[in-house]
Image (cartoon, rainbow, N blue to C red):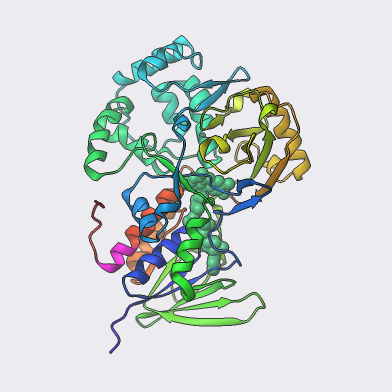
Amino acid sequence: MNDKQSVIVIGGGIAGLTAGFKLKKAGWDVKVLEANSQIGGPIQTVLSEGFLAELGPNTILETSPKVTQLVTEVGLDDQKIYADATSSKRFLVRDKRPHALPSSPGGILTTPLFSTKAKFVMVKELFTSSWDNRYEESLAQFVVRRLGPEFLAYAINPFVAGVYAGAPEHLSVKHGFPKLYELEQKYGGLIKGQIKGARERKKRQEKSKQAARMFSFKGGLKMLPETIASRLGKSVQKNSRVTDISQTGEKWQVTYTDQVGATGQITSDHVVYAGTAFGLPNLKVNDLPEANFAMFDDIYHPPVSSLTLGFRREDVSHPLDGFGMLIPEVEGFDILGALFTSTLFPMRAPQDHVTLTVFIGGVRQPQLAGKPQDELIEMALHDLKVTLGVSGKPVFSNHQFWPRAIPQYDVGYGKYKEMLDSLETRYPGLHFTGNYRNGISVADTIKNATELSEKLLGIESIPVE
Ligand SMILES: Cc1cc2nc3c(=O)[nH]c(=O)nc-3n(C[C@H](O)[C@H](O)[C@H](O)COP(=O)(O)OP(=O)(O)OC[C@H]3O[C@@H](n4cnc5c(N)ncnc54)[C@H](O)[C@@H]3O)c2cc1C
């Protein structure tokens, strides 16, 4: 009798690759089926003319030891680079100018980013009682209730555009920002929670997003999915789009189509769906009466364009001494913000040059994201001239359009999570992981995929030394 467990992982993004790698390492028979000719989902890097452009994510936050451990296990420690110390400085635009975000409580009191009235409301937060939790609030409702409208417009609106390409009026505080939600539910307030939460994170060896270090790799983020895929070897099968899943006794059967339309079938003990949320409705499921995948079509994934622009150093008057600049919607620009990518990591631009990565579109202005590259560059140049003093034309440009960039965990998102929870309970052997569940960041997807593999292997999730 063969006791070796087998799994088919649908999707070769970072979630699927992580789960596949962990299970293969534990001796399982693994097949990762990826619909595209490339693995890694949005984690793609282009190197050209001495410039490095990330087409999707630019950084990974080391919020969990599971992220650190994965990098070590795949043998990438010597390629890992942490962001420059200056990247702890972040800029927010107010009155058309970038201002450094205060990094200490004293700095909050003196920053020109917020009015005296807004600062008073922030201090008052310490004494604001908690919510009785009768209905699910949007992030905007939550923030206005605790910190006032100015904080929403000048801090939360640009922050949410930077992380989700989203809008605080739609995103659910409970599902999109569970840690923030927990601060109020568990500790009675944000400031109180920050203090007490830090102690608990220390015990779990986890780091808050503010305290976590940011990293990439010498050759860009694509090194991570590419290295995991090379460790998985023949277990990864590209150009294989899964079309059907069915349960046959205690086994799972998966049907896929390759790039010439030929179909194949594989049977396994487990199936892990690590595809996209918007891919779920296209999956045909047989004999799983409770699987309502059609509902996942309603999860909004706004379009985003990512534009990496290279300039001669002398053509940018701002010192670019930070992580980047976020722009509140009320400031009336076209771009959502810009990352100072050549400040963050070495080898992103040739000597005496800099790179900026600009994002356009999102929930704020979805109609702009799909514009032709020339128009996007014009928009970006206009906004960068006003905010960062960019005077010359770019000497390098790279554009990537993401028609469906990031799933929005909007108010009501709980129904998707409940559906996935109930399917996993109802159909043993069927599992779901990916950025549509419990966090959209690369770090969250790695952590969740690792926890899923630990569950399948029957190991208790223990903190990594
Ligand atoms: C522009 C942009 C910028 C971002 N910036 C950051 C950042 O700076 N930091 C950060 O932490 N995160 C960032 N993110 C988010 C992060 O990159 C993603 O959430 C994460 O990479 C998603 O990983 P995943 O494995 O869950 O999904 P994906 O990477 O989307 O992988 C899913 C894979 O499944 C495949 N697939 C789907 N259906 C099927 C099927 N039926 N059969 C076979 N294969 C299928 C898809 O082709 C895809 O390759 C950014 C995202 C974007 C788009």
Residue 97, can we see it? yes
| Number of marks drawn | 0
Residue 298: percent from left, percent from top: 55, 53
Q: Residue furthest top?
A: 116
Q: Residue at x 23, y 38 (%)?
A: 200
Residues rendered magenta in the picture: 453-458
Whether residue 109 appears in magenta in the rendering, the answer is no
Is residue 28 shown left or right of residue 49? left
Is residue 36 shown left or right of residue 195? right
Q: Residue furthest front?
A: 351
Above or below, comparing residue 450 to residue 362 in the picture: below
Residue 113: percent from left, percent from top: 51, 17
Above or below, comparing residue 365 to residue 276 in the picture: above
Q: Residue at x 53, y 45 (%)?
A: 58
Residue 292: percent from left, percent from top: 48, 63
Quarter that holds the N terminus: bottom left
Is residue 320 shown left or right of residue 270? right
Q: Nearer the viewer, residue 328 or 137?
A: 328
Q: Nearer the viewer, residue 434 or 423?
A: 434
Residue 336: percent from left, percent from top: 61, 34
Quarter of the image where one finds residue 29: bottom left
Q: Residue at x 66, y 49 (%)?
A: 400
Is residue 342 shown left or right of residue 6? right
Whether residue 455 appears in magenta in the rendering, the answer is yes
Q: Residue furthest bottom?
A: 1
Q: Main secondary structure of the magenta part?
A: helix
Q: Nearer the viewer, residue 221 or 253?
A: 221
Q: Nearer the viewer, residue 360 or 224?
A: 224
Residue 403, can we see it? no
Above or below, comparing residue 328 to residue 310 in the picture: above
